[in-house]
Amino acid sequence: MDHYLELVRRAKRGNADAFASLYQEIYEDLYRFAVYTLKNTVDAQDAVSETVTDAFASIQSLRADEAFKGWIFRILSNKCKKKLKEYADRNDVWSEELAGQLAAPDTMADAAELLQVRMLFWELQPLDRMIIAMHLFAGYTGREIAGLLHMNENTVRSRESRALKNMRDKL
């Protein structure tokens, strides 16, 4: 933890290598969150790229060094929300390309179930999808998600619970 905080401090002083080290530690989580939220690998890469650029440019504004991960995920979350609003205007459909880029299952039955789970996930309302992605893929607690999304913690928990139950019922 001390090494992590030292990297944050150095990055705040403008050290690009320190920022790159921090980025390397969380890139996969950022990308996974963006892919599952946006359903599009290219848009996910763009959102992560924009997030990293904005974070590096404004890291001096980070108040608490230990809050770096939450801070950068908040930036990504806002980028994803903006992109989801654009999607609503365009009515994008699920991409077959994504199925081949995510982890391959062991059997055909597993593949069918995995595909069905992903499709059900993408049928969720964008906010519910974001809540589940933040919890399952980025590891945030209900309280943290509530803070990041400016929502009541109980609302976050109930939306997540209802969305997961809805998915289970359709399986």
Image (cartoon, helix red, strand yellow):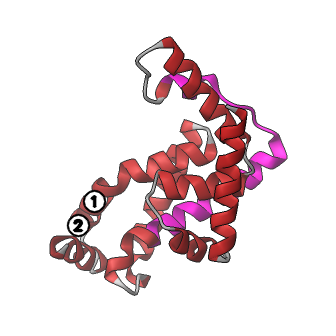
- Report the residue at 16% width, 71% height from top: 3
> 81 or 56, which is in the foreground?
81
Quarter of the view holding residue 19: bottom left
With respect to residue 51, does 144 lie above or below? Answer: below
Q: Residue furthest bottom?
A: 63
- Report the residue at 61% width, 64% height from top: 78
- Report the residue at 68% width, 36% height from top: 120
Quarter of the view holding residue 148: bottom right
Amino acid at dot 2: Ala
Q: Which residues are magenta?
A: 71-100
Q: In this figure, which residue is indicated by the disc labeled 2?
A: 18
Residue 135, how many percent across, how many down? Answer: 51, 58
Label 1 sits on a secondary structure element that is helix
Quarter of the image with the C terminus in it: top right
Relative side of 32 to 5, left or right: right
Q: Is residue 17 visible?
A: yes
- Mark 2 crowd level (few <14, some 14–19, many ≥20, 10 Å Cα): some
Label 2 sits on a secondary structure element that is helix
Give the Cα distance between marks 1 and 2. Answer: 5 Å
Quarter of the view holding residue 72: bottom left
Quarter of the image with the N terminus in it: bottom left
With respect to residue 135, does 118 lie above or below? Answer: above
Amino acid at dot 1: Ala
Q: Main secondary structure of the magenta part?
A: helix
- Mark 1 crowd level (few <14, some 14–19, many ≥20, 10 Å Cα): some
> 81 or 168, which is in the foreground?
168
The reply to whether the C-beta atoms of the residues labelled 1 and 2 are less than 8 Å apart is yes
Relative side of 83 to 106, left or right: right
Q: Verify whether residue 127 appears in magenta.
A: no
Q: Is residue 83 visible?
A: no
> 125 or 65, which is in the foreground?
125
